[in-house]
């Protein structure tokens, strides 16, 4: 169990640029989640994958956001035309695919928009 | 949006003391989970309690759940400096998949 890995750990970009984050889940986990966390708040659910299928998206995930999980392994989260309000920590989590399971989180990607 | 509120928002204690954090939520749940987050890091799962359970223990952790009051508490006994972190409760309605809805968190500081 090497844990959930997220890259990059930090991303600083100018408003209007596109950014992409990567998440590598624990290898045997077929559920994958993305969350967004702003300072002083708890994480907020963005989207969920079961294998390669994106089964749920939050209203927080505007049309500037897109997430993929090709082949049901790693996942990417892309934000197009970034805005100041996108500044946050983006967390990825994975879990086993049967029943009620704890989620295992990566250390996140902190996005700062200049 | 956050599901619930945690109380207190911040807690400062000495090593060896017990720490109690409370979580209130708004809607029906299948289970409730507690997570710890060290500064700048991801969340670590601590304990899961199902809606038909009232109390659960794991090491120095004790969690209670009162579904009639829509509340839960996390007790950490004999706290250590290493317990310094933010603690979040997360509710899960489990509508076919686990969609965790987190509270606002309690920041715990344990001083040596």
Image (tube, coloured by chain):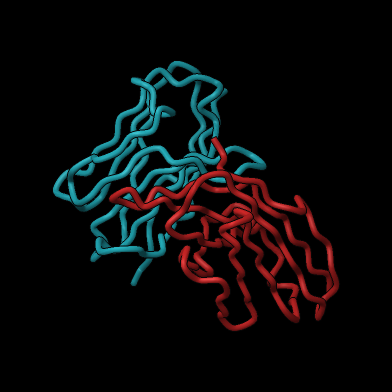
Chain colours: A cyan, B red
Q: Nearer the viewer, residue A79 or A7?
A: A79
Where A97 sits versus A21, above or below?
below
Q: Residue furthest front?
A: B68
Residue B3 screen position, x and y as percent: 56, 43
Residue B78 screen position, x and y as percent: 75, 81
Q: Residue at x 55, y 21 (%)?
A: A84
Residue B69 screen position, x and y as percent: 63, 55
Q: Residue at x 51, y 45 (%)?
A: B27
Quarter in which the C terminus of chain B is drawn: bottom right
Quarter in which the N terminus of chain B is drawn: top right
Q: Residue at x 78, y 75 (%)?
A: B18
Q: Is residue A54 left or right of residue B74?
A: left
Q: Is residue B37 left or right of residue A82?
A: right
Q: Is residue A69 left or right of residue A82?
A: left
Q: Nearer the viewer, residue A45 or A66?
A: A45
Query: Within the image, what quadrant is residue A22 found in?
Result: top left
* Tally of numbered discs: 0
Q: Residue at x 40, y 37 (%)?
A: A46
Q: Residue furthest left?
A: A71
Residue B105 screen position, x and y as percent: 65, 51
């Amino acid at each position: 169990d090497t844990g959930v890995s997220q890259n990059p750990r930090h991303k600083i970009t100018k408003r209007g640029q596109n950014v992409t984050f990567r998440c590598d889940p624990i290898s045997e986990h077929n559920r994958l989640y993305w969350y967004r966390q702003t300072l002083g708040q708890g994480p907020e659910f963005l989207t969920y994958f079961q294998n390669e299928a994106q089964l749920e998206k939050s209203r927080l995930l505007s049309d500037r956001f897109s997430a993929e999980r090709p082949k049901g392994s790693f996942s990417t989260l892309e934000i197009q035309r970034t805005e100041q309000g996108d500044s946050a920590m983006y967390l990825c989590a994975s879990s086993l695919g049967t029943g009620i399971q704890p989620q295992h989180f990566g250390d996140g990607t902190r996005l700062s928009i200049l | 949006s956050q599901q619930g509120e945690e109380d207190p928002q911040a807690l400062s204690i000495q090593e060896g003391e017990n720490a109690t954090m409370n979580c209130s939520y708004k809607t029906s749940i299948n289970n409730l989970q507690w997570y710890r987050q060290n500064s700048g890091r991801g969340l670590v799962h601590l304990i899961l309690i199902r809606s038909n359970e009232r109390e659960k223990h794991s090491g120095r952790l004790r969690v209670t759940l009162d579904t009639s009051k829509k509340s839960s508490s996390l007790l950490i006994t004999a706290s250590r400096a290493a317990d310094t972190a933010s603690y979040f409760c997360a509710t899960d309605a489990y509508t076919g998949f686990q969609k965790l809805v987190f509270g606002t968190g309690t920041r715990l500081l344990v001083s040596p």
